[in-house]
Amino acid sequence: MFERKQLKILRNRIEEKTNHIQILSGTRQVGKTTLVEQLLQYIDYPYQFTTADNVLSGDSNWISAQWESARIKLNSTGAKSVLLIIDEVQKIDKWSEAVKKLWDEDRRNYTNIKVILLGSSALLIDKGLTESLTGRFEIIFLPHWDYNEMHDAFGFNEDQYLYFGSYPGSAGLIHDEKRWKDYILNSIIETTISKDIVMLTNIKKPALLKNLFEVSCMYSSQILSYTKIIGNLSDKGNTITLAQYQFLLDKIWFTSGLQKYSGSKISLRNSIPKWNVYNNAFFNVYSNLIHNDCEPGSAIYGRLVESAIGSYLLNQCRINNISLYYWREGNNEVDFILKKGSKLISLEVKSGTMKNNNGQLLFANRFKTFKTIVVSNDTISWKEFIKLDINGLFD
């Protein structure tokens, strides 16, 4: 079975003497539970793997009962440590308070229980961590799968990644495009929005939220103000509400509204967003296209390429603490600006050849640029770029 690189990180962390609670965070259907199941094949000491999936949310004693079972295993087996894994932990009310109490008890009593927590709701996981578990945890982010993973695990080629995106559960359905779209719409999008946002946060207009997501997918890789977006929505709302809903969609790794780079945080907050999906499956599932429509030279091909590059950057920048922006002044534009520490990289994307890079030249004159990168057929192609290590760009 294919192993994501985050498995090695998790293995190393749970073997350390000084350990923290390990949190696996990411959107639904990217392999969090599978990764933990793979981990269990490598450990040689007792473990307890349980899920709160069917537990009543108000059963606050459930976590304590699971924890106590792990303690009993530790004492009865004579092992040096026990691994406790709780899946869907966010479904228990006040879960973080219960975990904090039990974790602190074990630290005081020198009880070596290693803990891994998983949850399908990034919103509730983040809320619990900031409320109660400060200083007690580390997060391992599981982003959407990248091209290299889809290629190694499922034999995807670059054009399949471009169109079908990178959900592992949909890889076997791509030869039946209707079935593939139904899976993405019903099993991924509807489930995630309904369970992770609408049911868990104060959403006054769920139809507006879903409509915003659809529009942001259709306009992926384009700069579009909230005011103009309102004109494309069936359920009208004000720009403040839309900005709040977009923040939630970004938290669950669905779509992002990139801000214009200006060097000023005040200007960032007031900029018009550039929309991009976290997974190109979202771009195409709302289109009337079929895979064969997306050939090089077609009208949509350039946007698909820029959106795919954007989704790759969104995921990789998020897990590597790299800030991602765009830049535009008048008719001059730079598709993506990457910022790590004090280093700035400007990145322009072309599906064909590069005719000019006036935007990058102007940006370099305005700001101190560490690197200027052009993705095109006569420099580095998009097919080569999606295989790169983003961190290596800053070397």
Image (spheres, helix red, strand yellow):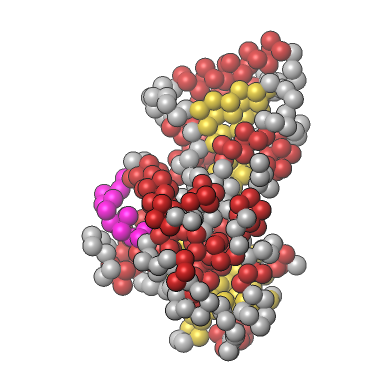
Is 201 or 35 nearer to us in this picture? 35
Find the residue positioned furthest to the top. 76
Is 35 or 180 nearer to us in this picture? 180
| The magenta stretch spans residue 300 | no
Q: What secondary structure is the magenta-colored segment mainly?
A: helix
User: Left of 161 or right of it: where is 127?
Assistant: left
Q: Quadrant of residue 86?
A: top right
Q: Residue at x 75, y 67 (%)?
A: 395
User: Left of 276 or right of it: where is 9?
Assistant: right
Give the residues in magenta. Answer: 201-214
Q: Residue at x 61, y 79 (%)?
A: 376
Is 310 or 290 nearer to us in this picture? 290
Q: Position of residue 147 (x, y in %)?
A: 61, 59
Looking at the image, residue 205 lies above or below residue 300: above
Q: Quadrant of residue 355?
A: bottom right
Q: Residue at x 54, y 25 (%)?
A: 50
